[in-house]
Structures are given as C-alpha cells and as structure tokens.
Amino acid sequence: MARMKFLCDAERCIECNGCVTACKNEHEVPWGVNRRRVVTINDGVPGERSMSVACMHCADAPCMAVCPTDCFYKTEEGVVLHDKDLCIGCGYCFFACPFGAPQFPNGPAAFGARGKMDKCTFCAGGPEADGSDEEFKKYGRNRLSEGKLPLCAEMCSTKALLAGDSAVLSDIYRDRVLRRGKGSEAWGWSTAYGDHGEKTREGAQERTQERTQAQEGRK
Amino acid sequence: MKTRLLALLSVAGIFGLAACGERPQIVEYKQGKYQGKADTRPWESAAFKGDKTAWENALRNRNQAQNEYKRVD
C-alpha cells in the first residue's frame, strides 16, 4: 500500500459542504473546530471553483518539523497523526501549515489558552487503542481500522473528493480527465436523459431556434 | 590546584560545547517505515485481527468504489 492521500477535483466540487458535515458528525467535532472546509475561489463569478481542504498529510509535513513537543507521528500509510497528551497548544503547527489544517477548540486565544490542537486524522484515530472510547473522545472515529476510507470522501455526492491510496487516486483522476466532456461523454448523462439524451438536446436547440425566429418575425 | 582548575575548565568546556551541537530538526519520512509514537496499526484492530492482506483488500475495494466508470457501465 502506497501513501494515503486526499484529492479534490475542482471541476466536480459543487460546494455542498457535505464533506464538512460528514466529518463533523462522524467525529463529533466540537463547535468552532473545522477539520475540513470548502474553499471557493471567485465566489459568485462565472467560472468559480470550489475545493474541499483539510490536512493533506504531507510527505514532509511542516507541522511535524516545528512542533516543540514532537507530538506528531506518521503511520506506515503516510497518515500524519498527533498525540494530544503531548500537545501544549502553542499553535506553531497552525502557523507552519500551508492549508490551515490545525484547529484549536478555544479559537484565537492567548498562548496556552487555545486548547489542544485538533486536525483531520484521515479517519485513523490516534495513539490510543483502535476503536476505544478514549480514542473517539480525543480524535474521533477510527474508520481506517475498520477497513473504510475517510467519510468525507465516501460521502461526497459528486465524487469530487477522493481519498485513499495515492496510486489508485491518480488512476481514477487520469481516467476522468481522459473521458471528461459534455453531453453523452459526461458520466451519468444516459442515466439522467436516457439513450435519447442527445435527441432531447437537439430538440431543445431546434425549439430555441424556432422561438428566436418567431420573435424576430414579430419585430 | 592548577590541574584541578584545568580539569574543571575542560569539563565546563565539554558541557558548554555540547549545547552548540545541532541535531536535525526535520523529520525525514521513509516510505513504508513507521515513525513516532506507539500506535496500533489499522489491520491490528478487532475487525482484521492482524490480517494485513485482508485489510489492504478491503481498502482497495473501497478505493475502486470511488471510480464511477468502474461501478457503472
């Protein structure tokens, strides 16, 4: 098994925030802490793009490098996890992270008053025994030990957000890019419009043309 | 007296220079090797009981389920 990664397809993300909701509900994340959020660029402007962002489980994680208590660790699958018992809530990881992944339950507060850092665990829990109550209270559910992928990705309605083995994700994405298109080339077109989808589209175009001609004739 | 002072100075020098040493601060991640805190591995859970192959197969199936082109023709 290669490295575990997230991949968000900005062409597919519809900013539904389903991933954010799924994460919050699954791990019972406290109010004010967002392990995952959806970022939209050029919001409201035609061509806007959205992307779901959380901890990217970096190969060379800057949070790991700056932590003064060395509370981070990395699993064999490349998931960056941390030990909350060692965290002092200094916030260095927050400043080091380019994705704003580390979150603090007490928000922006004085040094030592922010609370212990919380972040996406790739649904892999923490150092406590897998599936234990203690692990759930500190880190949320450990889906990886149940043979499941992170819920945010599995819940994604448009499958914009993918999670899992990076090699497999690359294959899926490559496949998509090669087939990407409009009309019958798009996935789900025949499901939505049947085999006559193309005819329906042609019919709609003809009707529009007729309507335009009629309007011009009236003028 | 002189030798004692010399010995004391050399010991102080050793301790003083020890603080100047620089240890690498960046964690180097080696692919497939576990680093850091003691934690049970995902396939050691009650669901898989140490069967790494079964765990990998379960994840592989889940991974492939994300590809609609393979789910629906």
Image: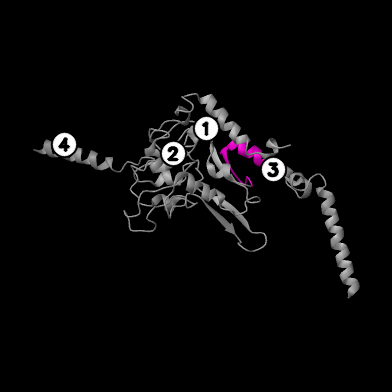
- The label nearer to you, 1 versus 4, is 1
Magenta span contains residue A82? no
In the rendered image, which quarter is residue A81 located in?
top left
Quick one: label 3 or label 2, which is nearer the N terminus?
2
Query: From the viewer's perspective, is A190 left or right of A24?
Result: right
Residue assigned mark 4: B7
Disc 2/disc 1 C-alpha distance (Å): 13 Å
| Dot 3 and dot 1 within a common chain | yes
Q: Which chain carries label 3?
A: A
> Observer-nearest residue: B26 or A90?
A90
User: Where's residue B11, x and y in %?
Assistant: 19, 38
Residue type marked 1: Gly
- Tag 2 and tag 4, C-beta contact below 8 Å: no
Which residue lies under the disc numbered 1?
Answer: A147
Residue A125 is labelled as 2
Q: Give the label, 3 or 1, closer to the camera.
A: 1
| Tags 3 and 2 on a common chain | yes
Tag 3 residue = A176
Helix, strand or loop under label 4:
helix
Residue kind at label 3, given as amino acid type: Arg
Q: Residues within 10 Å of mark 2 (few under 14, many from 20)?
A: many
Between the residue at mark 3 and the residue at mark 2, the CA separation in whole angstroms equals 31 Å
How far across and down, in percent of the image, does residue A73 sit? 42, 38
The one nearer the camera, A144 or A214, is A214
Q: Which of marks 2 and 4 is in front?
A: 2
Question: Residue A151: image x %, image y %?
Answer: 53, 42
Find the magenta span and give its range.
A158-178
